[in-house]
Image: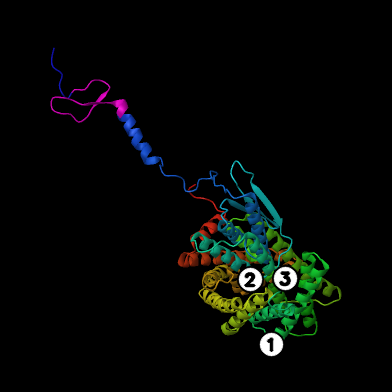
Amino acid sequence: MSEQSPFTSMPGTVTGPQRIGRPQLIPASRLGRQLKHQAVRVVRSSSPPTTALGTSTAADEATQRHARAVCDLALRVGEALLSTGASAADCVATVLRLGQAYGITSMHIDITYTSIAVSVHRGVDEDSLTVMRVIPDRSPDYTRMEAVQRHIDDIERSAEEAQAGIGTVMDVDVARTTLVSLLSSPHPYRRWVVTAGAAIMSVGVVMLYGAGPFMWMVAAFSAALVDRVQRLLYIWGIAAFFTQVLSAAIPAGIGLVMYAIGRETPSVVVISGIVVLLAGLSVLGAAQDAIDGYYVTAGARGLEVMMMTLGIAVGVALVLGIARRFGVSMEAAPFVALGGTPFISTIGAALIALGFCLSTYSGVRVIGLSIVIASGAWLVLEVALFLGLATPAAVAVAAAVVGALAFASFKVFRVPEDAIATAGIVSLLPGLAVYRALYLIMQNNEAVVPAAVIYFVSAVATGLGLAAGLAIGSFAARRKFGLDPAALRARRRSRGTYVADA
């Protein structure tokens, strides 16, 4: 029987590296398993998920009394911020920071347009706490917003000192008493100053369109009258929609009288009234909440904006309809353009910021910073339009500058970021596009409906550009200046978003 060659393999085996005179045989099944193992290692991930969805087991061992006290304080803070004009994301981030300062890390916040709910998970052996508070009214008041934010900063500072062993955290009852005192304190100035602010804002708007001193006075009178009428209707308890109808009818009626006596074109008076009314709405807030992922709140705010804008249309149409009934047909020019020089327009933008700050009870530092930032934003807009950018893109660029400077102001001067950002972009609101759309719709001509839709889409695109620009500018500034770790964690938790790698 012949000897087997060292290079010969048995059936079903593969010859591997061999020593001389002694073959090493690897079974085919083993080689297949090795190849499969290598392929699995290449494809299958061994790292934990970026975000472990639904697996959080964090629970607080705080006593029931402490948890209830913190929840009550958190609800009061959240209601104060939402009522005074803060966005949903900023409100949630602030409330989370408050909970962390008092050792409540498992706090969850849920916000709708008219309510805020706070929940604390206390483990499987203790009952969780969930409390809700309804938000009945909203009125932009940046002095109170700044006071609340400073109060939260003081609480966080006391918590940090307590952790360092050099003090104690502010007592929850003391913090609640201080908060109530801040929210019930008088306004920094009288109500007539708010009326003057609305008049100044209206003057700034007509300056953007190249109107003369006579139109300044007419616009100021119109805005002051609207403000006093709105105040009276609020005291009477009239629904906001009908208040908006009458508020829009006032500048339209003044424009009608001017047209009847042969004075200058009344278009700028109507536009100034629309911008002043839009400035009091949550156009920016709706877009900002949508970007931050708060779609329920954004939808509610968007519906409110739509209803209030419809109120403007009804008010203007009502005046023009009555005028035609008596044989007066006002032909307000629908294609008014920005007509002022860059210098005059910049002054107009500064006056708009000043008027808006006065009408929202802003402090002296907020007023000064807002004037400077609004003037710079308008110059950026002029340059962007000169370079050929479309209006939505141009306002987005200007809003990005405002967003960055607003966060820088917050970081350096500890003033409300929302106050600076909103005041800086009021002059960029799409009042002209809204006016053009409303005018075309009031013509009762089906042929102009497509053009009206285009202007409405332009107004919406401009609003989204403002919100997106502010968000991008604020994000860039945060990357530059940074946030402390606690504030950064709270801000991340406050943003609703899709996770690319869960």
Where does residue 296 sit, x and y in percent of width and height?
Answer: 65, 54
Three-letter residue code for mark 1: Pro
**Secondary structure of the residue carrying numbered label 1:** helix
Q: Nearest the camera: 447 or 23?
A: 23
Check disc 2 and report the residue beneath it: 429
Q: Residue furthest bottom?
A: 213
Three-letter residue code for mark 2: Leu
Query: Magenta stretch?
Result: 8-30
Query: Can you tell which of label 3 and label 1 is closer to the viewer?
Result: 1
Three-letter residue code for mark 3: Tyr
Distance between the Cα atoms at labels 3 and 2?
18 Å
Position of residue 402 relative to residue 11, above or below, is: below
Where does residue 244 sit, x and y in percent of width and height?
Answer: 76, 68
**Secondary structure of the residue carrying numbered label 3:** helix
Distance between the Cα atoms at labels 2 and 1?
23 Å
Instruction: Tell me which label, 2 or 1, sits earlier in the chain.
Output: 1
Check disc 3 and report the residue beneath it: 439
Query: Can you tell which of label 3 and label 2 is closer to the viewer?
Result: 2
The quadrant in which residue 426 appears is: bottom right
In this orientation, does residue 155 appear? yes
Check disc 1 and report the residue beneath it: 213
Would residue 13 appear left or right of 157 to someone viewing this image? left
The quadrant in which residue 279 appears is: bottom right
Numbered circle sitting on residue 351: none
Q: What residue lies at 86% left-to-right and 76% top-to-bottom?
A: 326
Query: Is residue 349 found inside the magenta-colored segment of the image?
Result: no
Predominant SS along the magenta part:
loop
Mark 2, residues whose alpha carbon is within 10 Å: few (<14), some, or many (≥20)?
many
